[in-house]
Image (cartoon, rainbow, N blue to C red):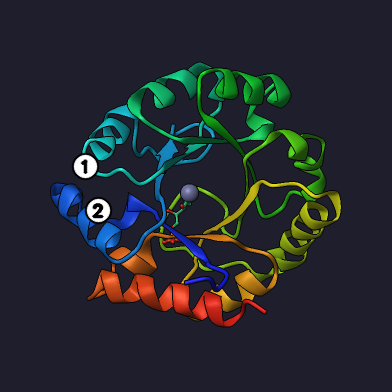
Amino acid sequence: MNEPRVLISPSILAADFARLGEAIAVVEKAGADMIHIDVMDGHFVPNLTLGPVIVKAVRGVTSLPIDAHLMVTDPEAYASVFIDAGADYVVFHSEASEDPATLIDRIHDLGGKAGLAVNPPNPAEQLEPFLSGIDLALVMTVNPGFAGQSFIGEVMPKLRTVSDWKRERGLEFLIEVDGGIGPSNAGTVVENGGEVLVAASAIFKADDPAAALREIRAAGERAVV
Ligand code: DX5
Ligand code: ZN
């Protein structure tokens, strides 16, 4: 298969936690490329979700890369905890960090890959100073806090800006997009530069999660020129 590929990172936030191992096995078999774990602290976002014990449990049942999406007010305090638990990517929101560049270096020193996230109301410029140092840029298409929200299409020009900067500057970070993604908008996301599509509800709330994952990827790949 030498066609360009769209990567899919199912977010376990909408999985059945009583059967998490099975849920991961299903998406892994269906071709998931990464597993996205949404960490919310009840401060940075108004919800409490998953912590390092879940990352560790997921690490124990899959060899796929784990991307830990830290929606926390103090990412400095937790980066090493998540890397120790088995996360490959530690993705944080730069407005939550006093010194994103230092945290990016620290994540690298700890053996992790570093990602920076930008929320829908915030501009691409929030990421710009750090682009040459990161492994992943996460463009949010919902305001973080909950699975099952509607995709905010107004974010597409910002996604395209990040994608243009990547190409023009010869940078190599992955462009991940997260929030409200499903078969109906995966093509738009890819057309605008999305490379890793995160989806929780569209996969885990579907009657057939494996088919849903394949459908999202196919819709994205149809948009690859
Ligand atoms: C939102 C999280 C997302 C969320 C995606 O705060 O960062 O990863 O779980 O859920 P869906 O795909 O249902 O919008
Ligand atoms: Zn997320």
The answer to which quarter of the image holds residue 164 is bottom right
Which residue sits furthest right? 168
Name the one closer to the observer, 180 or 129.
Answer: 129
128 in relation to 214, above or below = above
Q: Earlier in the sequence, mark 1 or mark 2?
A: 2
Residue shown at the point (25%, 62%) measured from the top left: 29
* Identity, as a three-letter code, of the amino acid under mark 2: Ile
Name the one closer to the observer, 129 or 40.
Answer: 129
Residue wearing tag 2:
24
Q: Residue 22 placed where, x, y %?
A: 16, 54
Name the one closer to the observer, 93 or 31.
Answer: 31
> Under tag 2, what secondary structure?
helix
Left or right: residue 45 compared with residue 53: right
Q: Residues within 10 Å of mark 2 (few under 14, many from 20)?
A: many
Q: Which mark is residue 139?
A: none
Split into quadrants, the picture shows ligand 1 in the one at bottom left
Q: Residue 128 placed where, x, y %?
A: 80, 42
108 in relation to 54, above or below = above
* Identity, as a three-letter code, of the amino acid under mark 1: Val
> Under tag 1, what secondary structure?
loop
